[in-house]
Image (tube, rainbow, N blue to C red):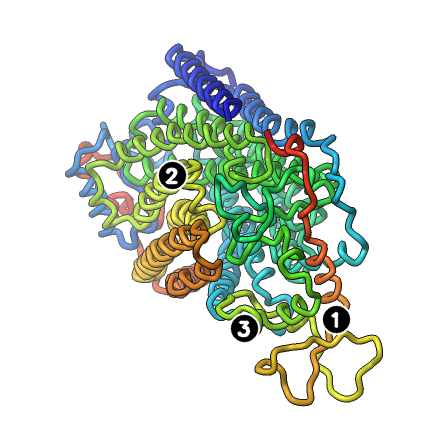
């Protein structure tokens, strides 16, 4: 125990020292270019001009612009010149092929994953449902759900958005569109192979690492090819500063292959050491892969839609490095109370608490950026998903830090509470942000508007409503389950029985979420086929006219040239 | 292009990112590797037999791990011992476990010492075929695909599952497949009631 306290104190002081050193070096300008870097995502006189291709109608984007004009933005001119508009259209189109493949694949896997998830949820309160076939048993459908979500939906959506963002962030057309597209296709093949392997009983047996190592080869190669295309684009960049989203995406693409190689190398891991490695990977794939991709999207779309640079660029860099440093060591908190070395768990608990630093940095930054403009959420579907997703990131992270504390963990460990928490992160945060990003990106890729803006609203309310039911119910159920498990006077079965109503409420919430995804997927397909009502409006990036005052800016005036 | 003063270059970014992940891997992967590499198996622990290993594969394939842990905790943390799940496990207990099956959920009870609590093969076979026949209120899935329903003459080598009368059907018998027998063999190997020296426990 004394030993543990010592480790705790040393890591805590060490982390504080590292943080102090980092802040000092940043104040000396060693790390970033300061506030001007926050403006590189805008054309020189663009600040003050809103952009949301998903706004539905020209009127809606006008209203969005109106909100920003009223609530006061930092814009000086709010002008995008015809040349800049043309350039941006070129950038947006340069990544069309790989992004369309990635996002289509993501939507396909979202639907499949939702069906798996819903089936697994039902099976927990109807255990004799669909038991005759081995591939439909709970123990295969559940990991199929997790992997389809993580490596199918989330990774492909994240890759697609990252590939699309790079040309915009670097003001350079994507170099190697075909390389990236090949990478995405390889990734798709890997995911398909992995899910089939799980369903036919060839799982590798480790959570988050169920795909057999052979299947991870196309994933590894695919991710690398995408990385190569993005790196080549990076080399030709025409911006003076690397925006923080570039950092997140580049680092994520660098980290993922390392994680995969270390975790999947056959034959070296054993017993308890493998368990430690398992959660090093399991948490890093969240912290060093999904989180960077999600935050990169927030850091781009939130300021871009509002036409207002991020509140503090410096803060976003603090967030980046502290996230990388602290998050990479939190995995051991999954093994609290387990047969692992005490120092390892202690280290992870300390770093889990230190995670509050990057989370507050990101949260304050987003809040200060969006503050005062919340009525813009009414007119911008992109913003609605992104802002809510950003809030969920803060909640999920703070909750995660709390859950790592031994007093809390003793109750929540091994229960459905953890499952609810995982969904707050990967769904509430990441998936919502990806929905918002895709609503922004697709019209720019296809030069076609989202055909039915009501379907966007329906999607939003179904998934957020469904998720609220899912999360609240399962968190309560999980907590009660943990309380009963800790009470030695009660038989174990009490901890099972108490969860039943909450497992049913999870199915209700999950059904709503799945319906929302079907709405989204149908809308996506209609758009892909360029069906539905075509409207001349916000979706299309058109030549604007020069305007003298920001107050005079309207989306219609953009389109009139 | 030339970088401006004070701008973080791609190189610095990559170097920082690599250093950070190397540090984390060092702490959570490499260090445990070296500290646990030479942990000897406790004297009472034996290597799995072929049948048990096949059963272990079945345990993995059918995702038992998603509801069952294999890591009783210390009495100071949770009443795992009071539930009969066994003494707190130590790294030596897992020497033969590749992949590890520690688990993160207890939708069902811990199985590290299930063979101590349920030493009967018949119980396990019947319970796999229909968990609710043995533990009312259980939400464990039934695994009928590990069994065959047969009628007519009994073959000499077949293992017939004895079910409680309410769950048995007239004239039909439930025969365990080889996979069910292997899985049961694995479950019956889960007995870590042998003594361990405290020194082999986690510090």
The answer to whether residue A341 is above or below residue A483 is: above
Helix, strand or loop at label 1? It is loop
What is the quadrant of residue B36 in the picture? top right
What is the quadrant of residue A265 in the picture? top right
Crowding at mark 1 (Cα within 10 Å: few <14, some 14-19, many 20+)? some
Q: Which residue is mark 1?
A: B177
| Residue A193 in the image, given as x and y percentages of width and height | 66, 55
Q: Is residue A10 visible?
A: yes
The chain that hosts pointer 1 is B
Helix, strand or loop at label 2? It is helix
Looking at the rendering, in which quadrant would you find the C terminus of chain B? top right
Gap in angstroms between the C-alphas marked 2 and 3: 43 Å
The chain that hosts pointer 2 is A
Q: Which residue is mark 2?
A: A298
Tell me: A79 left or right of A432: left
The chain that hosts pointer 3 is A
Tell me: A500 left or right of A221: left
Q: Residue at x 70, y 82 (%)?
A: B173
- Same chain letter for marks 2 and 3: yes
Q: Residue at x 40, y 51 (%)?
A: A483
Helix, strand or loop at label 3? It is loop
| Residue A297 in the image, given as x and y percentages of width and height | 41, 39
Q: Which residue is mark 3?
A: A128
Tell me: A330 left or right of A549: right
Q: Residue at x 33, y 27 (%)?
A: A44
């Amino acid at each position: 125990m004394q030993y543990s306290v010592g480790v705790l104190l040393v890591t805590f002081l060490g982390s504080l020292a590292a943080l102090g050193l980092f802040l000092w070096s940043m104040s000396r300008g060693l790390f970033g270019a300061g506030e001007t870097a926050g403006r590189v995502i805008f054309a020189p006189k663009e600040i003050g001009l809103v952009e949301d291709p998903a706004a539905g109608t020209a009127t809606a984007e006008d209203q969005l612009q109106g909100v920003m004009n009223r609530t006061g933005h930092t814009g000086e001119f709010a002008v995008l010149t015809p040349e800049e508009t043309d350039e941006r259209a070129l950038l947006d189109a340069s990544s069309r092929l790989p992004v369309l493949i990635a996002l289509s694949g993501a939507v396909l896997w979202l639907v499949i994953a939702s069906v798996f998830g819903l089936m697994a949820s039902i099976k927990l309160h109807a255990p004799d449902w669909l038991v005759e076939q081995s591939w439909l048993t709970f123990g295969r459908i559940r990991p199929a759900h997790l992997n389809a979500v993580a490596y199918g939906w989330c990774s492909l959506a994240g890759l697609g958005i990252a590939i699309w963002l790079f040309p915009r962030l670097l003001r350079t057309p994507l170099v190697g569109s075909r390389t990236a597209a090949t990478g995405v296709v390889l990734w798709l093949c890997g995911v398909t192979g992995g899910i089939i392997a799980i369903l036919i009983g060839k799982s590798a047996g480790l959570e988050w690492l169920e795909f057999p190592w052979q299947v991870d080869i196309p994933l590894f190669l695919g991710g690398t090819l995408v990385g190569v295309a993005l790196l080549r684009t990076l080399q030709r960049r025409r911006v003076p500063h690397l925006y923080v989203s570039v950092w997140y995406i580049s680092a994520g693409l660098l980290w993922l292959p390392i994680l995969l190689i270390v975790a999947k190398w056959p034959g070296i891991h054993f017993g308890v050491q493998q368990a430690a490695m398992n959660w090093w990977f399991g948490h890093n794939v969240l912290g060093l892969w999904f989180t960077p991709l999600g935050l990169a999207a927030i850091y781009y779309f939130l300021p871009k839609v509002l036409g207002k640079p991020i509140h503090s660029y410096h803060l976003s860099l603090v967030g980046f490095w502290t996230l990388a440093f602290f998050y990479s060591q939190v995995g051991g908190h999954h093994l609290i109370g387990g047969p692992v070395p005490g120092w390892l768990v202690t280290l992870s608990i300390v770093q889990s608490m230190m995670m509050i630093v990057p989370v507050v940095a990101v949260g304050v930054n987003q809040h200060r950026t969006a503050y005062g403009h919340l009525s813009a959420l009414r007119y911008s579907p992109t913003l609605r998903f992104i802002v809510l997703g950003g809030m969920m990131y803060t909640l999920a992270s703070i909750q995660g830090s709390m859950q790592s504390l031994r007093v809390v963990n003793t109750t929540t460990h091994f229960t459905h509470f953890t499952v609810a928490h995982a969904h707050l992160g990967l769904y509430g945060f990441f998936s919502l942000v990806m929905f918002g990003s895709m609503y922004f990106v697709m019209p720019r890729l296809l030069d076609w508007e989202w055909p039915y803006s009501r379907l966007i609203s329906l999607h939003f309310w179904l998934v957020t409503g469904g998720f609220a039911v899912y999360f609240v119910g399962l968190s309560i159920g999980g907590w009660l389950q943990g309380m009963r498990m800790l009470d030695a006077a009660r038989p174990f079965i009490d901890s099972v029985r108490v969860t039943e109503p909450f497992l049913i409420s999870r199915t209700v919430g999950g059904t709503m979420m799945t319906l929302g995804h079907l709405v989204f997927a149908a809308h996506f397909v209609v758009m892909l086929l360029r069906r539905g009502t075509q409207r001349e409006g916000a979706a299309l990036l058109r030549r604007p006219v020069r305007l003298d005052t920001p107050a005079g800016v309207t989306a219609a005036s953009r389109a009139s040239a | 292009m030339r970088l401006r003063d004070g701008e973080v270059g791609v190189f610095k970014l990559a170097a920082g990112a690599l250093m950070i992940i190397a540090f984390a891997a060092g702490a959570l992967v490499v260090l445990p590797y070296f500290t646990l590499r030479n942990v000897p198996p406790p004297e009472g622990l034996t290597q799995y037999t072929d049948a048990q290993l096949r059963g272990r594969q079945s345990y993995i394939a059918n995702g038992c791990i998603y509801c069952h842990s294999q890591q009783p905790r210390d009495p100071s943390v949770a009443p795992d011992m009071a539930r009969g799940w066994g003494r707190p496990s130590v790294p030596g207990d897992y020497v033969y476990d590749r992949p590890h099956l520690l688990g993160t959920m207890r939708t069902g009870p811990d199985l590290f010492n299930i063979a101590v609590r349920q030493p009967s093969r018949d119980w396990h076979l019947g319970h796999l075929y229909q968990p609710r026949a043995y533990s009312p209120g259980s939400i464990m899935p039934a695994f009928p695909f590990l069994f065959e329903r047969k009628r007519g003459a009994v073959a000499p080598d077949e293992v017939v599952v004895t079910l409680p009368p309410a769950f048995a059907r007239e004239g039909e018998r439930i025969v365990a497949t080889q996979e069910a027998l292997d899985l049961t063999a694995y479950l019956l190997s889960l007995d870590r009631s042998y003594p361990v020296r405290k020194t082999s426990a986690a510090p």
